[in-house]
Amino acid sequence: MPESSPVGPSQIGGSLRSVFCDEFDQSYRENERTDPSAAMKQLCRKAFEDLYRRRQSYLDHYFLTVCHIIRYVDLGEVDDKSIYINFLKAQLSSSELKLLLYNCLSETGSSKFEPLLQKHGLFENLHKESLVDHGHLSLLKDAAMNGHA
């Protein structure tokens, strides 16, 4: 895959995440062409690792912020945690949910991030049509999609 173009100030925010989703999709399709026998999860991991390697400085703080918000609510002494988690869910765009999903399927995200997102059902509003392959949603455990907290 060609080297990513620099990200300009006008792309910060939602459009930036959309650009990253497009880069992920392109990398996934290229990996699928070069290794058609690879498992779906392996292709997702490779495409995310490619994206992360190129865009780490933009993605790190974003994933950590979301993780810390969920962890704070999860560990806090709050009567109804779902209220606060629902505020966070309401702020997440389709592109953000997509990037979070693929982060959860990565080596790092699957052990650290996925359990928290599963517990609080962060992907219940993710439209599978936004994914490179509709089957990618099934790679997560059901709790992440069904809102089991």
Image (spheres, rainbow, N blue to C red):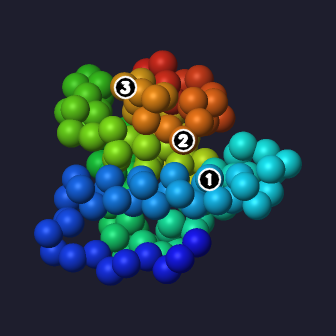
Q: From the viewer's perspective, is residue 91 above or below residue 9?
A: above
Q: Is residue 93 left or right of residue 57?
A: left
For the residues marked 1 and 2, what is the alpha-carbon distance in whole angstroms?
Answer: 8 Å
Q: Are marks 2 and 3 in contact (CB under 8 Å)?
A: no
Any mark on residue 132, and which? 2
Q: Which residue is at a point 14% across and 69% down the rendered structure image?
A: 10
Relative image position of residue 144 (x, y in whole percent): 51, 29
Q: Which residue is at a point 28% across and 34% down the rendered structure image?
A: 89
Q: Secondary structure at mark 1?
A: helix
Can you tell which quarter of the image residue 134 is in? Answer: top right
Question: Would you name the residue on which mark 3 appears?
Answer: 125
Relative image position of residue 108 (x, y in whole percent): 60, 60
Q: Is residue 18 left or right of residue 42?
A: left
Instruction: Point out the tag, 2 or 3, that comes first from the N-terminus.
Output: 3
Instruction: Point out the tag, 1 or 2, that comes first from the N-terminus.
Output: 1
Q: Quadrant of the N terminus?
A: bottom right
Q: Which residue is at a point 30% across and 49% down the rendered structure image?
A: 69
Question: Would you name the residue on which mark 1 appears?
Answer: 29
Any mark on residue 95, and which? none
Q: Secondary structure at mark 2?
A: loop
Q: Residues within 10 Å of mark 1 (few under 14, many from 20)?
A: some
Which mark lies nearer to you, 1 or 3?
1
Give the residue type at disc 3. Answer: Asn
Can you tell which quarter of the image residue 75 is in? Answer: top left
Instruction: Point out the tag, 1 or 3, that comes first from the N-terminus.
Output: 1
Give the residue type at disc 1. Answer: Arg
Along the line of sight, the residue nearer the viewer: 75 or 9: 9
Q: From the viewer's perspective, is residue 92 above or below residue 121?
A: below
Q: Are marks 1 and 2 in contact (CB under 8 Å)?
A: yes
